[in-house]
Image (cartoon, rainbow, N blue to C red):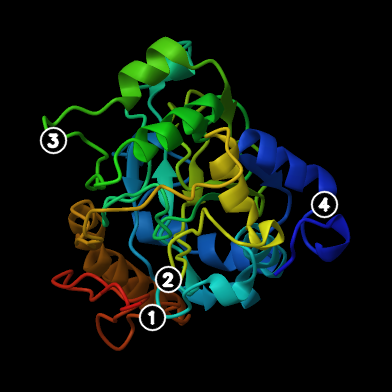
């Protein structure tokens, strides 16, 4: 693994490493190859059925698209993948049996005309959350190791960029530390309440808008609170937020301090400790079928028909893993009746 020596890092600069340890995120310019960005968004208007030049056809403000194309991370984003591996302590710690490919499950944000002149403070956006609606969260969970935001087009301020809440990360880490029994998908207490919207609205002040150029990546701690924003400028915005899974939960009590990953070090830093010898997860680690996949996957066959019709008219090809039928990818069955299992350790 890279360790903490700057000379051991090939993809992350010393400044980016330090920024992650202090802030829980960093901006990686051009983490994805341009030709792969172009390929993944090249048919987006065919898939949506919208006219890029007529906003009156943009019927939905925001939606998730199903996966039609995928590539191994190493090929899709050599620079980005290298940075991810260095944050997580080396590629050998990553589970390559699930979510091993980057895909074009684009999250589209078209905005609304009514937002153009509005000013909405990030703490007032609502829907502040931590990803991972498919497993039980623990402080050491590796199922959502990082929050990654990949820009598939240039994203300017006020154009639908994801907002992250930097000082909310510390609050989430401490909240999970105090709940070794684990918390379900939405990080709710047994009484059904969740802390994040009121905490972020009332206590947090460090907000960052994920803006940049197509191919840029924002690599954040997996417990980073974030929220979709309003696209005031109505410049269509396309991103993905992929999952990277660890083979084992984070180890927050390593014998050799040099063996800690940057992710583990940031987690410990936010607890103001060097290690956690006494902390132990006491609940059952579970995975679930995510409920929000239903609507996204409902678009799959509609998109595929649009791609086929376009190919018939133009004599082109259909660039989709589903050409021969609905496929299985990244460990999820397309009928969504089965979640990936947790390997026995």
Q: Residue furthest front?
A: 278
Left or right: residue 150 compared with residue 109: right
* Mark nearer the viewer, 2 or 3: 3
What residue sits 32% from the left and 73% below the top? 309
- Secondary structure state at the residue bearing disc 3: loop
Residue 13, disc: 4
* Mark nearer the viewer, 4 or 3: 3
Numbered-mark total: 4
For label 3, the residue is 190
The tag earlier along the polypeptide, 4 or 3, is 4
Is residue 268 or residue 311 the one in the foreground? 268
The tag earlier along the polypeptide, 1 or 2, is 2
For label 2, the residue is 99
**Is any atom of residue 259 visible in this view?**
yes
Q: CA distance from mark 1 to mark 2?
A: 15 Å
Left or right: residue 50 compared with residue 214: left
Residue 72 in which image quadrant: bottom right
Residue 109 in which image quadrant: top left
Is residue 335 or residue 13 the one in the foreground? 13
The tag earlier along the polypeptide, 3 or 1, is 3
- Secondary structure state at the residue bearing disc 1: loop
Tell me residue 71's x, y (percent): 53, 76
Q: CA distance from mark 1 to mark 4?
A: 36 Å
Tell me residue 255's x, y (percent): 61, 62
For label 1, the residue is 321
For the residue carrying disc 2, how many other residues have a C-alpha within 10 Å: few (<14), some (14-19), or many (20+)? some
Assign the C terminus to one quadrant of the image.
Answer: bottom left
The reply to whether dot 3 and dot 1 touch (C-beta < 8 Å) is no
Is residue 59 or residue 216 the one in the foreground? 216
Left or right: residue 297 compared with residue 203: left
For the residue carrying disc 3, how many other residues have a C-alpha within 10 Å: few (<14), some (14-19), or many (20+)? few
Is residue 266 or residue 217 the one in the foreground? 266
């Amino acid at each position: 693994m890279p360790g903490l020596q700057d000379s051991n890092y090939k993809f992350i600069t010393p400044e980016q490493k330090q920024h992650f340890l202090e802030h829980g995120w960093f901006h990686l310019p051009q983490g994805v190859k341009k030709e792969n960005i172009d390929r993944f968004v090249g048919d987006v208007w065919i898939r949506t059925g919208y006219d890029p030049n007529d906003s009156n056809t943009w019927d939905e403000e925001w939606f998730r698209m199903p996966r039609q194309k995928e590539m191994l991370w190493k090929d899709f984003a050599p620079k980005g993948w290298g940075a991810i591996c260095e944050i997580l302590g080396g590629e050998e710690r990553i589970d390559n049996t699930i979510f091993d490919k980057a895909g074009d499950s684009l999250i589209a944000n078209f905005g609304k005309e009514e937002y153009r002149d509005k000013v909405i403070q990030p703490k007032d956006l609502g829907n502040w959350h931590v990803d991972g609606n498919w497993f039980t969260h623990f402080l050491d969970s590796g199922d959502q190791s990082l929050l990654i935001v990949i820009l598939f087009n240039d994203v300017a301020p006020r154009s639908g960029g994801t907002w992250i809440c930097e000082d909310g990360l510390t609050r989430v880490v401490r909240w999970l530390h105090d709940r070794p029994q684990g918390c379900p998908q939405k990080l709710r207490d047994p009484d059904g309440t969740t802390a994040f919207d009121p905490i972020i609205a009332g206590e947090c002040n460090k907000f960052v808008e994920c803006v940049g150029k197509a191919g840029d990546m924002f690599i954040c701690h997996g417990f980073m609170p974030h929220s979709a924003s309003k696209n005031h400028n109505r410049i269509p915005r396309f991103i993905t937020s992929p999952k990277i899974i660890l083979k084992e939960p984070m180890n927050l009590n390593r014998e050799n301090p040099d063996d800690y990953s940057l992710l583990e070090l940031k987690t410990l830093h936010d607890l103001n400790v060097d290690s956690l010898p006494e902390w132990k997860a006491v609940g059952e680690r579970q995975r679930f079928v995510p409920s929000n996949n239903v609507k996204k996957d409902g678009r799959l066959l509609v998109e595929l028909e649009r791609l086929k019709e376009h190919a018939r008219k133009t004599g082109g090809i259909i660039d989709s893993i589903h050409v021969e039928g609905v496929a299985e990818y990244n460990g999820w069955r397309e009928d969504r009746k089965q979640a990936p299992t947790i390997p026995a350790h």
